[in-house]
């Protein structure tokens, strides 16, 4: 149900615990400013525009400073990821904060500040209309290097995500990439998170592995391909930060 343009029974988890070593800065990545405001505040404002209840920010590095920045937007819940053991672990840390009334959980990244509320709503709408257990927002790019590749089976069904470090040469040629944005039924998310193992090159708990778990369990999982690659641009370096700010300034000038 949508009330005053906000959706009931939906929680949003924002992953914002990382330091971001590629930024070459001692400042937590999500605190770097875009148009004068910390990156995380742009993501949080969009999340609060969508969810009626249960916006949870996972914090870690410089947790108190990240909390302070978030609270300038709106009172939200926080979950602490004390050790950086991967995105799957981050979501595990957040789950105790998800209200029992929530049916679907949307997972966002704190370093993707160009994402629009309408795109989140489109992902949720597609997820609900198709009756899926898990829906992934994906985009096609000319150069997929560095991103998790979306693997489809012979019937064009989503089967798994393979990270760059674990991808074969053939898989690295796949242009469809994971945006890191998900919509998952609360029940399936709780069950699948318990099955995560660190059996990968990084030795971490990958959130992406819940896709392969769902596929193995025969769950209904699928992909919504977003039309705008720029909207899901992640910030990993100082150059990325500048590029995203240029795009955001251009967007603001057009509105």
Image (cartoon, rainbow, N blue to C red):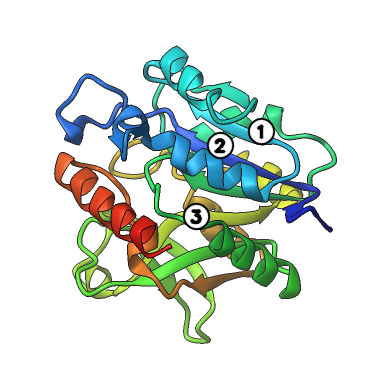
The quadrant in which the N terminus is found is bottom right
Q: Is residue 193 left or right of residue 85?
A: right
| Labelled disc at residue 138 | none
The quadrant in which the C terminus is found is bottom left
Question: Which callout, 3 or 1, points at the residue further toward the start of the chain?
Answer: 1
* Mark pair 3, 1: CA separation: 16 Å
Q: Tell me where residue 88 appears, x and y as whole percent.
A: 50, 39
- Label 3, residues with CA under 10 Å away: few <14, some 14-19, many ≥20: some
Q: Disc 1 vs disc 2: Cβ atoms closer than 8 Å?
A: yes
Q: Tell me where residue 246 appears, x and y as whole percent.
A: 23, 53
Q: Residue at x 27, y 51 (%)?
A: 244
| Mark 2 residue element | helix
Q: In this view, does 58 lie to the left or right of 147?
A: right
| Mark 3 residue element | strand
The answer to whether one can see residue 204 in this image is no
| Whether residue 15 is situated above or below residue 248 in the rendered picture | above
Q: Tell me where residue 158 appears, x and y as whole percent.
A: 52, 72
| Labelled disc at residue 181 | 3
Displayed quadrant of residue 222: bottom right
Displayed quadrant of residue 253: bottom left
| Labelled disc at residue 95 | 1
Q: Which residue lies under the disc numbered 2?
A: 91
């Amino acid at each position: 149900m949508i009330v005053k343009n906000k959706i009931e029974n939906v929680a949003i988890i924002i992953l914002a615990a990382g330091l971001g070593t590629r930024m070459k800065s001692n400042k937590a990545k999500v605190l770097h400013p875009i148009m004068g405001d910390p990156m995380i505040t742009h993501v949080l404002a969009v999340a609060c525009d969508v969810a009626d209840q249960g916006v949870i920010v996972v914090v870690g590095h410089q947790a108190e400073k990240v909390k302070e920045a978030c609270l300038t937007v709106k009172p939200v819940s926080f979950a602490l990821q004390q050790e950086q053991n991967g995105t799957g672990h981050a979501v595990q840390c957040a789950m105790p904060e998800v209200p029992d009334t929530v049916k679907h959980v949307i997972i966002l990244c704190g370093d993707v500040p160009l994402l629009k509320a309408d795109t989140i709503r489109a992902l949720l709408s597609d997820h609900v209309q198709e009756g899926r257990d898990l829906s992934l927002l994906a985009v096609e790019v000319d150069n997929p290097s560095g991103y998790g590749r979306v693997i489809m089976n012979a019937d064009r069904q989503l089967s798994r995500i393979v990270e760059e470090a674990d991808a074969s040469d053939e898989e690295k040629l796949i242009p469809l990439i994971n945006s890191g944005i998900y919509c998952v039924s609360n029940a399936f998310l709780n069950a699948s998170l318990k099955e995560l193992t660190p059996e990968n090159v990084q030795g971490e708990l990958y959130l992406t592995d819940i896709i392969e778990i769902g596929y193995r369990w025969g769950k209904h999982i699928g992909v919504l391909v977003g039309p705008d690659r720029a909207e899901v641009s992640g910030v990993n370096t100082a150059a990325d930060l500048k590029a995203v700010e240029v795009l955001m300034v251009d967007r603001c000038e057009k509105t």
